[in-house]
Amino acid sequence: MAYRFGALIGLLIPLFLTGGDISKERIAYQIYRNECAAKAQNLIHWNSGENFPSLGIGHFIWYPEGVEERFAESFPALIRFMEVKGVTVPAWLKGAAPWHAALQMQHDARVPELRAFLQRTMDLQAAFMEKRADDALPAMLRHLPPKARTTLLHNYRRLRGTAQGRYILVDYRNFKGDGTNPRERYRGEGWGLMQVLLCMSDTLPPEKAFVKCARKLLKRRVANAPPARHEERWLQGWFNRLNTYL
């Protein structure tokens, strides 16, 4: 069974990497628009009500020392990816985020250096997101029983076969995670890529089925979220982002 599972992954990964997609450059730019409104000043961001900054074209999360949240941290992994690619990274970016509040970050003299670093490494940030998307399929399948695995593969292949499919998979994976992290739940209910793919039905075209399910799960997330987070303020923006998938 393990061999058959590994062989199946080997057959599917080339499907994920090829096909009649929009270009990687357009995917990266669209994500830059989604996350940063295509403005360099938005490469460094701190959401109101959150305890961490979000950085780069993918708004990668970077936790300060002592901060633990349910959302998967991604900026340190980006830094490690860049180092493997031979990028010289400022030493202060290799540890925890050095700020505990947005105002503290805004007054740090190192912020212009960070923004310049993020501007000149946009191509590698896009490559990092592509790699995370490529890794998502085997990660999701490992977390599922056989019947659910079959459902996910079916819906994944339908979506991946569309012109927008790779963009949707890369963007949503970066946007809301792959759904495998048990901490990324409210009241036991997730909203990641895995959950959306499992929700899809065959009664709609794949892109529309994906958007319909993502809207449903994100509305459920808001309903289940701790009231103090006021996540309803973000819902329309999330829906606007999903509309770019159609």
Image (cartoon, rainbow, N blue to C red):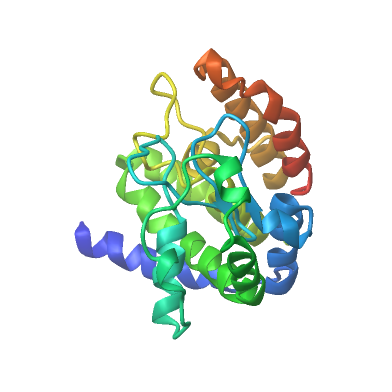
Q: Residue at x 49, y 73 (%)?
A: 14
Q: Residue at x 69, y 38 (%)?
A: 211
**Residue 159 place in picture, x, y as percent:** 62, 52
Residue lying furthest bottom: 86
Q: Nearer the viewer, residue 66 or 148?
A: 66
Q: Is residue 52 visible in this depiction of the protein?
A: yes
Classify residue 44 by image quadrant: bottom right
Classify residue 181 by image quadrant: top left
Seen in the image, is 99 located left or right of residue 203? left
Q: Nearer the viewer, residue 41 or 148?
A: 41
Q: Residue at x 22, y 65 (%)?
A: 3
**Residue 192 place in picture, x, y as percent:** 50, 40
Seen in the image, is 1 located left or right of residue 98? left
**Residue 65 place in picture, x, y as percent:** 35, 46
Q: Is residue 161 visible in this depiction of the protein?
A: no
Seen in the image, is 57 located left or right of residue 29? left
Seen in the image, is 77 located left or right of residue 230? left
Quarter placement of the N terminus: bottom left
How many tags in the picture?
0
**Residue 163 place in picture, x, y as percent:** 73, 62
Q: Residue at x 71, y 59 (%)?
A: 32
Q: Nearer the viewer, residue 34 or 113?
A: 113
